[in-house]
Image: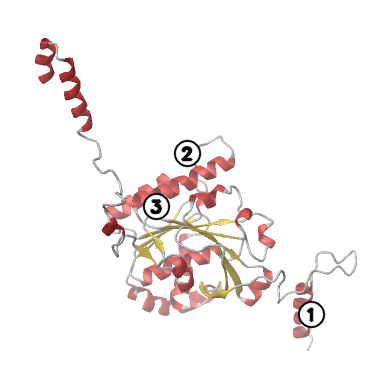
Amino acid sequence: MSSVDLLKAGDFDGIRFIVDNALKAGQDKNLGHEYVKDIEERYRENSREVIPTPWDRINNILQGGLGNGDFGLIFGNPGGGKSWSLVALGGHAVRLGYNVLHYTLELGEDYVGKRYDAYFTKIPVDKIDSFRSKVEETIPQLPGKLIIKEYPTGRASVSTIESHIAKCTSMGVKPDMVIIDYVDLLSSRKTNRERKDEIDDIYTSTKGLARQLNIPVWSVSQVNRAGAKDNIIEGDKAAGSYDKIMITDFCMSLSRKKEDKVNNTGRFHVMKNRYGMDGITFSLEADTSTGHISVNDVYEDDGGDEHMAPKTQSNKFDTDVDTFDKQLLRQKFFELNP
């Protein structure tokens, strides 16, 4: 209305000034982090809030743990214990008093719940049904809250998870950490495109969700066929899209070959770390019946495996049986025939 009088007077510059100010009224006045001015702010103790992992050595290189808005990813071969590592991360956070939302896209809610029961009670998951009284005694003492939500494979998207998080928040359970098992099984907004483009879109949206909610998000992903045979899984063995690693803030691989599954051993290899050292490999002890994983000293690969001799081919009919298989079969034979 003020511009009407200006129009009659022919003051067009005045009109433009009024309109420009009106358009700027709703703009964000925050310029960002002013490097010189905000020195005190970036050195405050709470400038980066983190949730520790169960593994001190991983926390040391992460400056305490995965922080608010960070996206952490663990690669592994099928059946290697990826989902158990997520249970360990979620269970440790609940023990510390944090609220955790665990989304499962391949396992049932009840079975994931039993895995957490096994983690908290240290009773193997295949025997947990016989120790219900122990579960009922232990679980109510946990200071944090855990919600497990199952979605059918390929039917849920990042938006579906975002809506469920908003529902939980409105009902009084605001999450401190989100676990997705696993991101690759979500559906993409970009349909009828190459699978790589869909995966990139899913990972980008997940990283955006972590930043929007300002909480850490953990997930897992598989390696390709070649990576499943490696003693140490490197970044080039990521299945689907190598860009997964670029999008994440922290990424490591869990390598457990068949001899590791027998001996309850394995290796964590840090592929990427925005907050410290990467390229380092740790040896570990992994009990995949309870989800307890212990990270030990730095692992040095000598080009072979001290537990397994190199593959031999004694004859043309024996090409798929290595020394480890033979030793295991020999041990079973003498157990059955003392």
Circles 2 and 1: CB atoms closer than 8 Å: no
Residue 107 drawn at (x, y percent): 52, 59
Q: Using a 10 Å C-alpha cutoff, classify the residue at mark 3 as few (fewer than 14 neighbours), some (14 to 19) or many (20 or more).
A: many
User: Distance of mark 2 from mark 1, alpha carbons?
Assistant: 53 Å
Q: Earlier in the sequence, mark 3 or mark 1?
A: 3
Residue kind at label 3, given as amino acid type: Ala
Quadrant housing residue 319: bottom right
Residue kind at label 1, given as amino acid type: Arg
User: Distance of mark 2 from mark 3, alpha carbons?
Assistant: 18 Å
Q: Earlier in the sequence, mark 2 or mark 3?
A: 2
Q: Look at the numbered disc 1 and give the secondary structure of its residue.
A: helix
Q: Residue at x 55, y 73 (%)?
A: 289
Disc 2 target residue: 189
User: Distance of mark 3 from mark 1, alpha carbons?
Assistant: 51 Å
Looking at the image, residue 210 sits to the left or right of residue 279; the answer is left
Q: Is residue 157 visible?
A: no
Q: Residue at x 30, y 49 (%)?
A: 33
Q: Which mark is residue 210?
A: 3
Residue kind at label 2, given as amino acid type: Arg
Which residue is at the front of the view, 2 or 325? 2
Q: Residue at x 44, y 69 (%)?
A: 59
Which residue is at the front of the view, 7 or 106? 7
Disc 1 target residue: 330
Q: Is residue 304 visible?
A: yes
